[in-house]
Amino acid sequence: MHTKQELQVAALENGTVIDHIPCENLFTVVSLLQLEKMHSNITIGFNLDSKVLGKKGIIKIANKIFSDDEINRIAVVAPNVKLNIIDNYQVIEKKWVELPDELLGIVKCNNPKCITNNEPMPTKFHVINHKECLVKCHYCEKEQTREEITIL
Amino acid sequence: MKKESFVSIAELSKDKILYLLEMSKEFEKTPNRKILDGKIVATLFFEPSTRTRLSFETAANRLGARVIGFTDPKATSSSKGETLKDTVLMVSNYADIIVMRHYLEGAPKYASEKAPVPIINAGDGANQHPSQTMLDLYSIQKTQGTLENLNIFLVGDLKYGRTVHSLLMAMRHFNPTFHFIAPDELKMPEEYKLYCKKNNIRYVEHTEFTDQIIADADILYMTRIQKERFTDLMEYEHVKNSYVLRNAMLANTRSNLRVLHPLPRVNEIDHDVDNNPKAYYFQQALNGVYVRQAIICDTLGLSLETIKD
């Protein structure tokens, strides 16, 4: 079933629709997913009407299914995003992006004296508060809020 | 034997803390026990800390273990760019256990994930110094007969003082009342006050350090105020002599009061306090050896029963 907004941009035959992206984070999501490096047909909708968000962003990527790791990268900046997996113009699977309990190799530790910034190793964060996106470095034990988060 | 690293005080349960203190007591009774004969303890000090290193090496020697290691990272391969992982894996080939001091925060935890032998954190930057906390707890328990329901006064640099933060976290199991005495620039950070609230730890904040304020203290934990912590040097000049403990201030304090200090001391405890029976900081340092004997044995999988035999 297509919503009115989705019809404003071209319908997708196969691939993924990422919906309900807060406008202010749309282009961060684009860069997190490294869409600029993809060769598939991609439609990006910006400032579309949304009952929930007022205005929203939407991204349609042809012939691409994201892995959980790739989706986790979005969760940090856009926690309530919805993913529709499309096959032959039909939604075959709906996914809600959720912040995992652990973030592996996604977030940079802001503490310059943390071992993760001085050793070739992946970072690891524990999500202390999912709602506020408060995360704590597994190694140096420093906490950081959503506003302080830098994506690797 | 079960390998279990000792890297963070936050991971220790109340039972585990009391168990390690019980084991430390055994070592105080009889410090020389050759139960680690044939074992090798590596002390890797990526930043110098003579006091901590001597304490660990004494502990290892009293247990009959041999000690290898380095005290100056400039003379080692890490200055040539070797990763911590490589250093730790190499040393694991030689030693049964690694005691590590590192200027980078989280280094011992990372090492504990990579090394096949247990790691003991002997201090990682501003993060943790769990063996110091254990010896503080041991000193408090020994002088007060209990860890429960005590009035603990923390004085000096409460902002950067890693020992006071770890002590605060470890005491959450024992229903303490804390008093924080510090200048505005060095007061207890918000995150630790939040931690107190979350864990139902009572605390009172003071900026003045007077004999009236410390009248009902059981433990007076002094720390050094460092000049380099101040952005405003005028402020430093103003406060540097305000947080000094003098013998006269102890006259009307409780008879069970003991003065602790992680050492080194500069001028924050006047030398006239040293002969007061309430001064406990040198015995406190000695307790560090017993506590570290217990930590080394526990991480190598030796139980309290084995030690008693």
Image (tube, grey):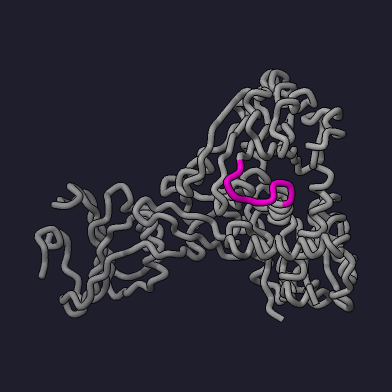
- Quadrant of the frame with the N terminus of chain A: bottom left
- Give x and y (percent) for residue B75: 88, 58
> Is residue B309 rendered to the left or right of residue B119?
right
Residue B102 lies in magenta, yes or no? no
Q: Quadrant of residue B131?
A: bottom right
Q: Which residue: 63% across, 40% down? A: B152
User: What secondary structure prevails in the magenta region?
Assistant: loop
Q: Position of residue A89 (x, y in %)?
A: 16, 76
- Place residue A45 in its image quadrant: bottom left
Q: Nearer the viewer, residue B135 or B42?
A: B135
Which residue corresponds to the image point at 74% horizontal and 34% vertical from the top-left?
Answer: B224
Res B95 → quadrant: bottom right
Q: Nearer the viewer, residue B85 or B302?
A: B302
Residue B257 placement (x, y as % from top left): 71, 37
Q: Residue at x 76, y 40 (%)?
A: B261
Which residue lies at the image location 63% right of the left edge and 59% below the top edge? B8
Q: Nearer the viewer, residue A85 or A104?
A: A104
Q: Position of residue A98 (x, y in %)?
A: 33, 63
**How many numbered marks have been drawn onto this rendered protein structure?**
0
Q: Residue furthest front?
A: B255
**Residue B244 visible in the displayed image:** no
Task: Using the image as rendered, state which of residue A91 and residue A143 is in the foreground.
Answer: A143
Residue B288 versus residue B272 in the image, above or below:
below
Any part of residue B152 in sight: yes
Numbered range of the magenta stretch: B142-150
**On the picture, is B52 further left or further right than A111?**
right
